[in-house]
Amino acid sequence: MDESSHKMAVPNGWEVKAPSQEFLGLEKNVRDKIDGYLAEHPVKLGAIAKRLGVKVLLSTLPRGTSGKIGQENGDFVIRVNRHEAKHRQRFTLAHELAHFMLHRDLVVAKGGLSENVLLRSGQPVNIEYEANRLASDLVIPSTQLAAVTAQYSGPMTNEIIEDLARKFGVSTAAMEIKLQMT
Ligand SMILES: [Zn+2]
């Protein structure tokens, strides 16, 4: 079945995108560490990083660089561009955490990844798609979104999407993707 057709039905008739293969494929010991955080909103990404042993720093990065991940003195460190908008920083952090969970060997082999504003690091684009899908599951966990959307009734409106985006600390664009609007 095509991945894009995986949906979770919500009692009010809306649809929520089902968790990605990348999320479902995470090792149990990783899920055990992060699942608790995925049950609250906005998801505490910093706490997830800490739990995974990853250091996160807001840094002044070159214009056009949204974030990076690499090893510094033996520790995995994610740097997020402090000059970008808050929602943007959250998604960048989630994207780098996804690289840490999915592509750690690549990060080590390449001596780190540095991402442009499209969250492209120069690696094959499927690597970035994987990271974006998992990042989306970190900032807007499907199960939690399904539970939260069940509190609304009637047609989905822009106001509701903005309300949900605010609750999860994401852009309305990111929320629309998760609500199968695009
Ligand atoms: Zn990336």
Image (tube, rainbow, N blue to C red):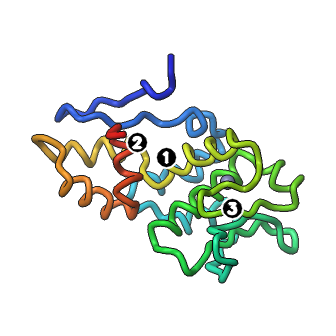
Q: Secondary structure at mark 2?
A: helix
Q: Residues within 10 Å of mark 3 (few under 14, many from 20)?
A: many
Viewed as shown, does residue 90 lie left or right of 171? Answer: right
Along the line of sight, which residue is nearer the eye, 135 or 75? 135
- Kind of residue at disc 2: Ser
- Kind of residue at disc 3: Glu
135 relative to 143, above or below? below
In the image, the residue with mark 3 has its CB under 8 Å from the nearest atom of ligand 1 = yes
- Quadrant in which the C terminus is drawn: top left
Residue at which label 2 appears = 142
Residue at which label 1 appears = 137
Viewed as shown, does residue 150 lie left or right of 139? Answer: left
- Kind of residue at disc 1: Asp
Q: CA distance from mark 1 to mark 3?
A: 19 Å
Determine contact: label 2, label 1, CB under 8 Å. Answer: yes
Residue 142, x across and y down, in percent = 40, 42
Between tags 2 and 3, which lies in front? 3
Viewed as shown, does residue 73 lie left or right of 127? Answer: right
N-terminal label among 2 and 3: 3
N-terminal label among 1 and 3: 3
95 relative to 4, above or below? below
